[in-house]
Amino acid sequence: MKQPYDTALVVEGGGMRGVFSTGLLDGFQERRFNPFALYIGVSSGASNLAAYLAGMAGRNRLIYLDYSLRPQFISISRFLAGGHLLDLDWLWENTIRDIRLDLAAIYGPGKPFLVGLTDVGTGRAVFKDTAPDNLEHVLLASSAVPLYYRNYPEVDGKPMTDGGVADAIPVAEALRRGARRIMVVRSRRRDYRKRPGLFDQWVMSRYLRRRPALKEAMMKRVACYNETLDLIRRPPDGTEIVEICPPDAFRVSRLCRNHDILQEGYDQGRAEAAAAVARWNGR
């Protein structure tokens, strides 16, 4: 830890549900709202943060509503044949070629941008301090959901996977780094609490049987997620957490491929921006 940062913006991932946070962050850009000293994102939330910090409003909307809906990205037939369900290599190659992030704009202000990862060997959360020469690769690693993407990208010589496995909403990390006022952008409705499901408890358990530490982290995911929700609702004395969630009418699922529903989710995020800014400013 270098120096304490009094304010932080934390953005949850969640696959296609991240279309809400990209809409919200585009709304922030329209209002020139960026009072934060520290940024922490996980998975798709980290990618949305990157576009926000780059000042590229509309970039990630294009990814959700165009690139992510192309058959080269999501393919059930390829997955059943042993390949990726989500071909992140294809997505990164094409978006870097066509709409590359403005890396100079992201790092010009000198503010820390951390991306959450899960260490495959230990099952623990890792928060990588990014820079122009590693951001794109770290973003890919943070989005590499086990099973959906068959590889484990290496960061600092260690295999990594989806940051949401070990710490989906890294509020505790922001507090650890000194933040006393935090905005948390969720990808789930406020009343959501994680529950054990067949996918995590059986499918993932079987798939990860040769990765015991990662398997254990996956089995603890429900408890860790709900503990973070408790922390958000009851923050430590002397701290404030402003929680921004999709509305009750939010319909986007993790693997949603419906263009109209995704557009609706994006619009819901943009519509929430004014109220979120007002809450942060105490109005």
Image: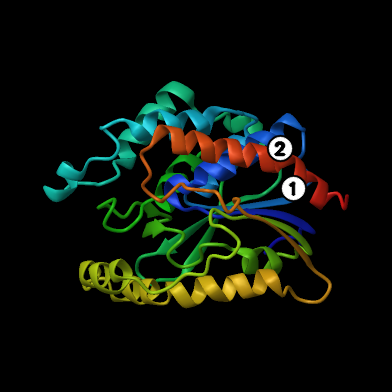
- Which residue is nearer to you in this view: 230 or 159? 230
Depicted 40 relative to depicted 232: above or below: above
Is 23 positioned to the left or the right of 17 in the image? right
- Measuring 34% from the left and 51% from the top, which residue is drawn there? 153
Would you identify the image quadrant in which residue 173 lies?
bottom right
How many numbered discs? 2
Q: Is residue 229 left or right of residue 94?
A: right
Inspect this view and state whether residue 108 appears. Answer: no
In front: 228, or 195? 195
Q: Residue furthest top?
A: 98
**Label 2 Cα neighbours within 10 Å, binned few <14 / some 14-19 / many ≥20:** many
- Which percent across, then down, holds residue 213? 34, 75
> Residue 19 placed where, x, y %?
51, 41
Q: Are marks 2 and 1 in contact (CB under 8 Å)?
A: yes
Q: Amino acid at mark 2?
A: Phe
Q: Residue 266: which disc?
A: none
Q: Locate the N terminus and report the quarter of the image it occupies.
A: bottom right
Q: State whether residue 189 is above or below residue 139.
A: below
Say whether residue 77 is left or right of residue 94.
left
Kindly identify the amino acid type of the residue bearing the numbered disc 1.
Ala
Residue ID for mark 1: 276
Question: Label 1: few (<14), some or many (≥20) within 10 Å?
Answer: many
The residue under label 2 is 28
